[in-house]
Amino acid sequence: HTYAGLRSERIKLEKDVAKNMGVLHEEQRNYHIFHANAIQTQARLLLVEKEAKFVRGEEKLGQDGAKTFQELLGNSIKALTAHAKDLRKEQKAIKENHTDKLEQRKMFEDLNKIITLKHKLAVEAKHKEEAEKAEGTNFMQIADDLTDTGMGERMIINN
């Protein structure tokens, strides 16, 4: 009876250990989640503290003297928008003022069409020549029948 009692006690303890390991893993997962959230909150707090210093004038945020991150990003967006507008104007001017290059491009495209057509015609001529050559070689051939007796003949037409 003591062996059976000890065995059932051991099984009960193993189940408790497995249950406690599951709880431990859950607690470790929660700890890591809370730790990550704490680090994220600290980073946000640091940004808020820096921005407060910028607003109070204790520090400058950028070379243009922006007081907040929002102002800095707004200035960057304005600068990039103006740059994009200038690039579009420049692109339009290039397209309008380079007619000689457009003429050269058109001539190149026409040459490319001519070469492509010439290649296509050469290929068609080659296929036609091969077909005419193949027609000239059609003939009838009489061969021995491959039957067991070997007595008959059969007609074979080569294409």
Image (spheres, rainbow, N blue to C red):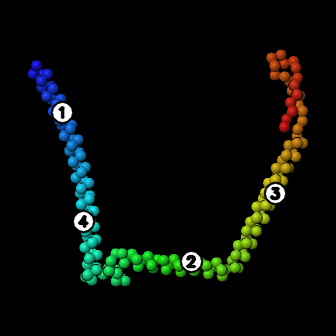
Q: Earlier in the sequence, mark 4 or mark 3?
A: 4
Residue that mark 1 sits on = 14
Of the pair 74 and 113, the residue shown nearer to us? 74
Q: Determine crowd level at label 2: few under 14, some 14-19, many 20+ residues with C-alpha closer than 10 A.
A: few
Q: Quadrant of the C terminus?
A: top right
Type of residue at label 4? Gln
Q: Position of residue 58 (x, y in %)?
A: 25, 82
2 or 4: tag closer to the N-terminus: 4
User: Which three-letter amino acid code belongs to the residue tagged 3?
Assistant: Leu
Which of the two marks, 3 or 1, is nearer to us in this view? Answer: 1
Residue to which mark 4 is pinned: 42
The answer for how far apart the CA atoms under marks 2 and 1 are is 74 Å
Give me the C-alpha separation between circle 2 and circle 4: 43 Å
Q: Earlier in the sequence, mark 1 or mark 4?
A: 1
C-alpha span from label 4 to label 3: 75 Å
The residue lying toward the viewer, choosing from 144 and 84, is 84
The label nearer to you, 4 versus 3, is 4
Q: What element carries label 3?
A: helix
Left or right placement of residue 50 versus residue 124 in this view: left
Mark closer to the chain start, 2 or 3: 2
Can you say whether 5 is above or below 139 in the image?
above
Locate residue 67, reporting x and y percent.
32, 80
Q: Which of the 4 image quarters holds residue 155?
A: top right
Label 2 to label 3, Cα distance in Å? 44 Å
Which amino acid type is shown beneath numbered disc 2? Arg
Location of mark 2 (residue): 88
Looking at this rendering, what residue extends furthest in the left direction? 2
Residue at 83%, 16% (x, y): give it. Answer: 149
What residue does disc 3 label? 121
